[in-house]
């Protein structure tokens, strides 16, 4: 198979995975904001649905009074909340209102005795997840058609009447068209699940669930499939084992315990904290990089998950409502008394099986340090995803010149991003800037372009970048102890140091620099551009780019060693044929003023398994290296600009393309 064909196939795989991730994120964004309502229903069910006879009590707290709230909550309130949330995601409050109205049709058609007689109906979560966004989409299209055609003063009248008419029409449509389809789907899914349970085949679901979790598809599976089916089953039986399939922390906990015993290097050092956060905090994303470092560990999670489900089936275990997050605490909160033993044996069995298999795999692995930073390369080989390193990917330089607001983004906005935000927030606070910089965590779907800096996992970086074009984007492969956190804190420190006033010497140096000629002001000069690089490998290319920086007189020769040191810890290959080698934070003293070098390799050179055609050396004074990376990234995100760089025949042409980089 040709290289072009292989690349096309890999792009299709990545594109399909990203589309599924987006779909899963959207489903999650409808469910996650309403998890509190699910928990409230589960708690009311646990506390008061134990007897129809209150034992003679006739007061307002008698069980039959409180029980009267349970069925309407799961039949009407929860689906309407989901529909409103889904509609709001598509077309703000207007979309949410119409989505909720339209969903009433399918709710009534699947719950009212007029339609179903005395047969118990199913909660219409799936119907709500369809009608909410669909109705909002219809309203959004209507608004676009009417834009500019409504006479001034009639906007409110038209908007309100159109919402009412569209909502009523869609409610009728969902009642007679969607409801029968939902009946068939729910019945078929219920029969299929019960068939798997009866034949003891449900453990086989782990073959799909565990790998999908590691590929960040856990929300698509949990909230898109298992939560609606599980809630229906819990309503009829008082609990559902489906809530345990994805949320069981045992498989991931076993892997982390194996790293504690047989791991090496930074992986072993960070595993204890990761295990605690995973088990008690329910942040499953924290163990994904540990598995991706050694994809063979998927076997441990799969067999761990299968064994846990098998034991849960034997003990007839289940939960009343979804465990979100999937921590041991929430498992026990949502487990009815008669399922406590099964839930306990389930996660313990999953942990032990996963631990044993993972230990064998780690023990048999060749010796060497297990470094979480190296998980990036494993992810690329396994998932066909380009490497992503910290750097600015676009935005307004003026806004990004001072970092005051930071957002961590992940699929659901409640797991790994919350933990990462906490880690960075503490680092910033320890550095003395806690009152100057805010750090929050958000779901990708709820991101707005209001932040100075965004941090996300490498596999989610492309999706997180889309709604935040003005922010500086930083990608990490480990939310626990990423070296990027120190880079961010260092930049904030430099910026605040500048605000607090420069020393007399620094002021004099700045004045002298501003008085120099235009050649000294140039960050990239013709003398620092080579169009026919002679290096034949990554290390030689770093030397070639570094020597050009040194030749400007703005950088000491020791900076080249720092560039190699940086490359040894985190790859600076950015994708699209571009590598940007630069030094570590400890090498700041070797930089007198900002400089860049540009080397083009027409035949390309190997850069950690990737082909680099452009190598740009960067030495940023103060915090300017992020600004420089931002400008370079903007150029290389434009295919026309890259084509111009490839076709350029003189250094002057390169300078013209990079004109915005010069001060």
Image: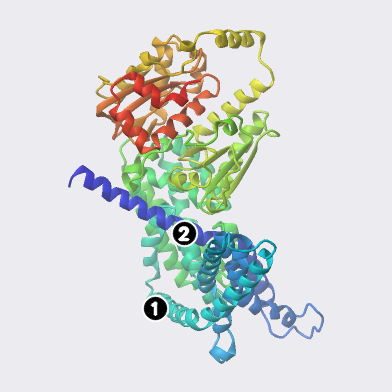
Residue at 49% x, 36% y: name it.
394
- Name the mark on residue 195: 1
- Name the mark on residue 24: 2
Residue 123 visible in the snapshot: no
Residue 356 x/y as whole percent: 39, 52
**In this figure, which colouring scheme has been used for the structure?**
rainbow
Q: Secondary structure at mark 2?
A: helix
Residue at 23% x, 44% y: name it.
4
Q: How many marks?
A: 2
- Name the mark on residue 393: none
Q: Report the front residue among 146 and 276.
A: 146
Residue 169 x/y as whole percent: 56, 78
Eye-nearest disc, 2 or 1: 2
Residue 71 visible in the snapshot: yes
Residue at 46% x, 59% y: name it.
24
Nearest to N terminus: mark 2 or mark 1: 2
Give residue 101's quadrant in the image. Answer: bottom right
């Amino acid at each position: 198979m040709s290289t072009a064909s292989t690349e096309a196939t890999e792009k299709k795989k990545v594109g399909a995975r990203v589309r599924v991730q987006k779909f899963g994120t959207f489903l999650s964004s409808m469910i996650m904001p309403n998890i509190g309502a699910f928990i409230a229903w589960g708690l009311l069910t646990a506390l008061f649905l134990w007897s129809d006879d209150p034992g003679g009590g006739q007061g307002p707290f008698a069980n039959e009074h409180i029980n009267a709230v349970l069925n309407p909550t799961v039949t009407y309130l929860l689906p309407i909340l989901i529909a409103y949330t889904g509609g709001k995601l598509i077309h703000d409050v207007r979309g949410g209102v119409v989505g909720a109205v339209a969903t009433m049709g399918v709710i009534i058609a699947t719950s009212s005795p007029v339609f179903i007689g005395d047969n118990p109906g199913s909660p219409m979560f799936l119907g709500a997840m369809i009608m909410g966004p669909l109705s909002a989409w219809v309203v959004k299209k209507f608004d676009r058609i009417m834009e500019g055609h409504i006479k001034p003063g009639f906007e409110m009248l038209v908007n309100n009447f159109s919402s009412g008419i569209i909502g009523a029409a869609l409610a009728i449509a969902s009642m007679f068209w969607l409801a029968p389809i939902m009946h068939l789907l729910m019945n078929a899914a219920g029969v299929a699940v019960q068939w798997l349970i009866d034949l003891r085949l449900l453990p086989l679901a782990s073959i799909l669930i565990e790998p999908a979790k590691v590929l960040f598809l856990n929300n698509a599976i949990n909230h898109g499939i298992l939560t609606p089916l599980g809630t229906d089953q819990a309503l009829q039986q008082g609990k559902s084992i489906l809530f345990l399939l994805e949320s069981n922390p045992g498989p991931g906990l076993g892997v982390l315990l194996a790293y504690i015993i047989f791991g090496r290097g930074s992986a072993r050092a960070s595993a204890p904290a990761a295990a605690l956060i995973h088990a008690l905090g329910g942040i499953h994303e924290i163990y994904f990089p540990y598995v991706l470092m050694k994809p063979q560990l998927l076997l441990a999670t799969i067999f761990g998950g299968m064994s846990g489900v098998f034991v849960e089936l034997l003990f007839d275990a289940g939960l009343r409502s979804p465990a979100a997050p999937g921590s041991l605490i929430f498992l026990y909160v949502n487990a009815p008394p008669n399922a406590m033993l099964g839930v306990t044996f389930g996660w313990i069995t999953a942990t032990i099986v996963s631990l044993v298999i993972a230990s064998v795999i780690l023990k048999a692995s060749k010796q060497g340090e297990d470094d979480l930073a190296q998980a990036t390369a494993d992810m690329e080989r396994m998932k066909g995803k380009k490497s992503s390193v910290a750097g600015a990917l676009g935005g307004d330089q003026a806004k990004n010149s001072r970092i005051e607001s930071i957002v961590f983004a992940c699929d659901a906005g409640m797991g790994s991003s919350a933990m990462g935000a906490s880690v960075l927030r503490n680092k910033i606070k320890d550095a003395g800037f806690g009152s100057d910089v805010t750090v929050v965590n958000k779901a990708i779907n709820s991101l707005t372009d209001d932040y100075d800096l965004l941090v996300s996992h490498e596999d989610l970086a492309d999706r997180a970048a889309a709604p935040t074009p003005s922010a500086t984007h930083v990608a990490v492969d480990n939310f626990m102890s990423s070296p990027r956190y120190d880079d961010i804190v260092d930049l904030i420190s430099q910026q605040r140091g500048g605000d607090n006033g420069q020393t007399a010497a620094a002021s004099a140096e700045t004045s002298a620099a501003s008085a120099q000629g235009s050649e000294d002001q140039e960050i990239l000069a013709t003398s620092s551009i080579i169009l026919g690089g002679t290096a034949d490998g990554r290390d030689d290319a770093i030397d070639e780019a570094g020597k050009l920086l040194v030749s400007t007189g703005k950088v000491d020769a020791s900076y080249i060693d720092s560039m190699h040191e940086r490359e040894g810890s985190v790859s600076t290959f950015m994708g699209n044929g571009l590598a940007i080698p630069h030094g570590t934070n400890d090498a700041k003293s070797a930089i007198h003023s900002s400089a860049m070098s540009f080397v083009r390799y027409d035949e390309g050179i190997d850069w950690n398994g990737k082909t680099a055609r452009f190598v740009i050396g960067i030495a940023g004074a103060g915090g300017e290296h992020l600004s420089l990376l931002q400008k370079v990234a903007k150029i290389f995100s434009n295919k026309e600009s890259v084509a111009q760089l490839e076709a350029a025949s003189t250094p002057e042409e390169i300078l013209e393309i990079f004109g915005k980089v010069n001060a």
